[in-house]
Image (cartoon, rainbow, N blue to C red):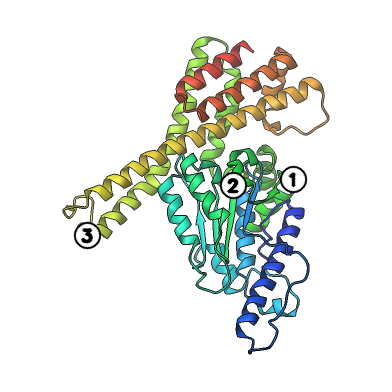
């Protein structure tokens, strides 16, 4: 299996990255030959012409396009040590130690950074910059994959800028963000930008069957309703609770006939998002807390006393867990709003008689009912109301207030 096998629907991007990985491999080989050549002998190999490899990359694309998957695959190709390379094979075999350890997250020279918080601060970014200044332990590349570059605070972005401006010789930065506008202009101007597209529905269904062992019918249905969002499609196909929550969201347009219905629907959306956050807390927080207590030397079990001077570490973990719960609730709510947008997009499709497949064909009766009771103009206003709610949440407006305003606007049309 090549490292690119899980990259879905991004042929142009993978071709460019594969070419860059070949040039990167040539640069490593040339550098090694230069340092091992006898005095007076020429070093091996200039790769000839301008290299397609550079020290900083920016991957952008809509949610579900596979930005982090592409970045991980490229990181693996850069660390590939397959002997086939010497015979003209492309780096990124997927089987060698370099590829395997990168893909599973254990390679000593690959740091993969993702956040379950609302932002990435200066302290964390300084730690990354220090890591990036080190020489690679394996002699190839020091790779930093920053999956949420759009969540860098302004101060953190300025810290990162210095590292990107003056990179260490064997350090590669791989930044991921939804759009190029989500990254500081000074940073993006120093990166090679690759834009990803939403993968075709058929391609997403195929990878769910091939990689995750999901039944073809279930995979096709999940890919269709998520419109090519790989991560959401996998969750819907494997998590019954996610399917139940989505079904509840799609009933909302029929439940907002009066103000009372609007307020009740808004509260239920908030409560469902809170349940998601609670579920994550139950799965993760207890384990994290017990592991930290054990590391600090507390007795086994929650009743064990902490050694003196360690309360600060426990408080820091609790604060992090609270911030993660907030992020989880916001993300869950945003997914519900995306599903709601898809519902009204299907309504608009029916109203205009557009010859395109419906994403939510399983609720065709509801779509027909809403389409007959309104006009395309009113449907567009409702979509705009959902977008306005998402933007309000991004500005940290109180979630219940933002959702209540949205449901009232959906009723008014």
Mark 3 vs mark 1: in front:
3
Visible residue check, residue 139: yes
What residue does disc 3 label?
297
Residue 361 sits above or below residue 252 on the image: below
- Residue 58 spot, x, y in % from top left: 63, 50
- Residue 371 spot, x, y in % from top left: 72, 18
* Distance CA(mark 3)–CA(mark 1): 51 Å
Sequence-wise, the earlier of marks 1 and 2 is 2
Crowding at label 2, few (<14), some or many (≥20) Cα neighbours within 10 Å? some
Residue 172 sits above or below residue 208 on the image: below
Mark 2 vs mark 3: in front:
2
Q: Say what secondary structure mark 3 lies in.
A: loop
Left or right, 339 with respect to 204, comes to left
Sequence-wise, the earlier of marks 2 and 3 is 2
The residue at 22%/52% (across/down) is 310
Which quadrant of the rendered structure holds the C terminus? top right
Crowding at label 3, few (<14), some or many (≥20) Cα neighbours within 10 Å? some
Labelled pair 2, 3 in contact (Cβ < 8 Å): no
What residue does disc 1 label?
200
* Distance CA(mark 1)–CA(mark 2): 31 Å
Sequence-wise, the earlier of marks 3 and 1 is 1
In terms of image quadrants, where is residue 72?
bottom right
The residue at 52%/30% (across/down) is 394
- Residue 182 spot, x, y in % from top left: 59, 39
Mark 1 vs mark 2: in front:
2
Q: Say what secondary structure mark 2 lies in.
A: helix
What residue does disc 2 label?
187
Residue nearest the viewer, comparing 38 with 407: 38
């Amino acid at each position: 299996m090549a490292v690119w096998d899980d990259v879905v629907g991004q042929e142009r991007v993978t071709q460019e990255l594969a070419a860059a990985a070949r040039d990167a491999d040539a640069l490593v080989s040339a550098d090694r030959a230069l340092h091992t050549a006898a005095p007076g002998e020429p070093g091996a190999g200039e790769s000839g012409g301008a290299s397609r490899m550079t020290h900083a990359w920016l991957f952008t694309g809509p949610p579900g396009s596979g930005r982090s998957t592409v970045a991980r695959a490229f990181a693996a190709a850069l660390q590939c040590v397959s002997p086939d390379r010497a015979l003209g094979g492309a780096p990124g075999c997927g089987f060698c130690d370099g590829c395997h350890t990168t893909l599973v997250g254990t390679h000593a020279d690959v740091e993969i950074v993702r956040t379950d918080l609302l932002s990435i601060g200066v302290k964390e970014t300084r730690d990354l910059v220090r890591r990036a200044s080190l020489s690679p332990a394996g002699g190839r590349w020091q790779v930093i994959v920053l999956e949420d570059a759009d969540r860098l605070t302004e101060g953190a972005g300025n810290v990162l800028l210095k590292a990107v401006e003056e990179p260490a010789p064997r350090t590669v930065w791989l930044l991921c963000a939804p759009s190029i506008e989500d990254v500081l202009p000074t940073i993006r101007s120093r990166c090679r930008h690759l834009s990803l597209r939403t993968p075709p529905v058929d391609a997403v269904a195929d990878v769910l069957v091939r990689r995750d062992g999901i039944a073809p019918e279930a995979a096709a249905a999940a890919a269709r309703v998520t419109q090519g969002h790989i991560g959401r499609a996998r969750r819907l196909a494997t998590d019954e609770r996610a399917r139940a929550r989505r079904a509840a969201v799609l009933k909302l347009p029929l439940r907002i006939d009066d103000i009372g219905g609007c307020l009740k629907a808004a509260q239920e959306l908030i409560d469902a998002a809170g349940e998601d956050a609670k579920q994550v807390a139950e799965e993760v927080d207890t384990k994290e807390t017990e592991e930290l207590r054990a590391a600090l030397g507390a007795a086994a079990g929650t009743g064990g006393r902490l050694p003196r001077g360690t309360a600060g570490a426990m408080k820091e973990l609790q604060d992090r867990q609270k911030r993660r719960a907030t992020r989880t609730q916001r993300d869950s709510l945003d997914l519900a709003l995306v599903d709601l947008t898809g519902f009204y997009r299907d309504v608009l499709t029916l109203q205009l008689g557009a010859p395109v497949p419906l994403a939510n064909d399983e609720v065709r009766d509801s779509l027909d009912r809403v389409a007959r009771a309104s006009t395309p103009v009113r449907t567009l206003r409702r979509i705009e109301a959902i977008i306005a709610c998402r933007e309000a949440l991004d500005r940290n407006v109180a979630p219940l207030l933002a959702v209540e305003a949205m449901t009232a606007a959906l009723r008014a049309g």
